[in-house]
Every structure is written in structure tokens, then in C-alpha cells.
Amino acid sequence: MNSRRTRIYEGKAKILYEGPEPGTVIVHYKDDTTAFDSQKKAVIDGKGVLNQRISEYIFTRLNNLGLPTHFMRTLNMREQLVREVEIIPLEIVVRNVAAGSLSKRFGLAEGTQLPRSIVEFYYKSDELGDPMVSEEHITAFGWANPQDIDDVMALALRINDFLSGLFLGVGLKLVDFKLEFGRLYENEEMRIILADEISPDNCRLWDVKTNEKLDKDRFRQDLGKVAEAYQEVARRLGILPEAGVRDMQGPDTVQ
Ligand code: UDP
């Protein structure tokens, strides 16, 4: 690890370092994984490399479509240079098919097609276990204003349309996923852009034919072959090197 760099923050799956220029941040993808409010922990060899690669690919496609994201470029197999944003303290979950907490809350069998895509908001707080919130809470507590909420919802639904098609094209059903957005201040103006990552850590992806789970539920539900599932997602997207993940490990930090 390069000790000259200043660490800004260490989360459960990523470390943030100060970037080389003002307004930039380096994101380092770790192999660590957690679930159920960090009660369950593990290290999954190669996960960070796969998530970096998958997220890089998706964010590049979104940038090219004019959907603004924080992603600037990949620095090495585990690290990306991103724009520094002020993170909106909300987790935005988009759902197409019932699973996880939605199935539990409404007694819907996992796999039930929803009548339309549903967007939910959760307040980002580990201590509180990310409680679900409504627009009333968001505006009353000042986490975002009604215009911000409109922008976030519109972006989230456009991202859902793009991702659903992208994954369907490689035989995967996008069941649900979580997004985070940030505020970017540029020339006295504020824009809301997509931040964080999009990977099997924060998406539910099922094989279209068999409904096999190819995402973090393999870890949550002890289904085994977690890294293999993430690798399969990368392989289907056509972004896995011929030699497989072993070829992707390389040095931790190359600047
Ligand atoms: N999710 C996430 N981080 C969280 C909570 C959820 O990335 O802290 C993702 C999760 O992987 C799934 C979607 O958001 O793709 C919906 O998750 P859900 O609310 O069903 O919660 P879970 O069942 O994962 O606890």
C-alpha cells in the first residue's frame, strides 16, 4: 500500500484516498464483504478487482449516454479516480421484481414481477440500520429538497432502464439495486451526479432461465461460490480477461 497517500475514509468494502488534484478522490475496492449490519463478515478473494471492473464498465457506459457519474478513469485493477462530491445521505433502491426486504415487508413471494418499477429511499446511517424514509422525512430533515428528489428519481429510473436492458442482453434479470448520488459544485452551479458503485454487491442479478442468483445474496444466504458468481457476471458482460480473475490480481497500488 502506498503510504504517501492520505486516507479520507475507510468503509466496509472500499477505502477513499485524496486524489492527485483538488476535487478528485481515489476509490480502492477491497475484498472485504459484510451483510446484516456488519454482523456477517468475510474476505472474498478477487471481489474488489471484479467489482472495480464491473462498476468501471457500467459507469463508462452511463457517462457515454450523458447520464452524469463521478467516474473519471481506472487507475489500476482495484482503484478508480472519481470526482469529489458531497454525498446525499440516502440510499436509493430501485426494484423491478420482489425480493429481500420488499418481499418480507409485503409478504410477496420472491420473484413476483412488480406492477411497475418502484423507487425507495433509505437514510444512510449504520447506527440506525439505514431506516426507510419518505419524501416528507427527506425534505423536513433537509437531506434533499423536492427538486433534488425529482432529479434523483429521474436519474434512477433512466439508469434502471439502461441497466435492465444491458443485463437482459446477457441473460441476467435485474431484480433490484441500490444507488447513491452526490452534489457536484462547478462554476457556482450544483449538479446531482451518480456516485458510489454498481456491482453484484449492490444489485440482485438472476439468471433469466434458471433464476440462479449471481450477486451478494450468495454470501448473505450462504449459497457458496460468491467470487465465481461475480466472475460470471463480468464474463457475460464480456469484460473478464481470458485467463480469468487470477490474471486480474496484480499489484495493489500502481500510480
Ligand atoms: N442494498 C445495498 N446496500 C444496502 C441495502 C441494500 O446495496 O445497505 C441493495 C441490495 O443488494 C439489493 C437492493 O439494495 O440489491 C435492495 O435490498 P433490500 O432492501 O431488499 O435489502 P436486503 O434484503 O439486501 O437487506
Image (cartoon, helix red, strand yellow):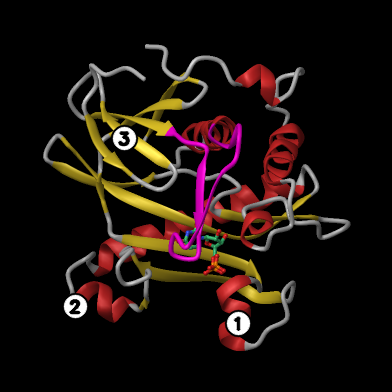
Task: Give above or below for 19 relative to 27.
Answer: above
> Is label 2 in a helix, a strand or a loop?
helix
Give yes or no for contact between labels 2 and 3 (Cβ–Cβ under 8 Å): no
Type of amino acid under label 1: Lys
Task: Single out the residue that lies furthest toward the right.
Answer: 209
- What range is drawn magenta here? 29-48
> Mark 2 is on which residue type?
Ala
Give me the C-alpha separation between circle 3 and circle 1: 34 Å
On residue 104, the disc is 1
Question: Are circles 1 and 2 on residues that touch, CB within 8 Å?
Answer: no
Marks 1/2: CA–CA distance: 28 Å
Few, some or many residues within 10 Å of mark 1 (<14, 14–19, 20+): few
Q: Position of residue 15 (x, y in %)?
A: 35, 36
The N terminus appears in which quarter of the rendering? top left
Looking at marks 3 and 1 on the same chain, the residue that comes earlier in the sequence is marked by 3
Residue at label 3? 16
Could you tell which of marks 2 and 3 lies nearer the N-terminus? 3
Q: Nearer the viewer, residue 107 or 169?
A: 107
In front of the other: 203 or 251: 251
Q: Is mark 1 within 8 Å of ligand 1?
A: yes
What element does badge 1 sit on? helix
Which label's residue is closer to the chain start, 1 or 2?
1
Which residue corresponds to mark 2?
A: 140
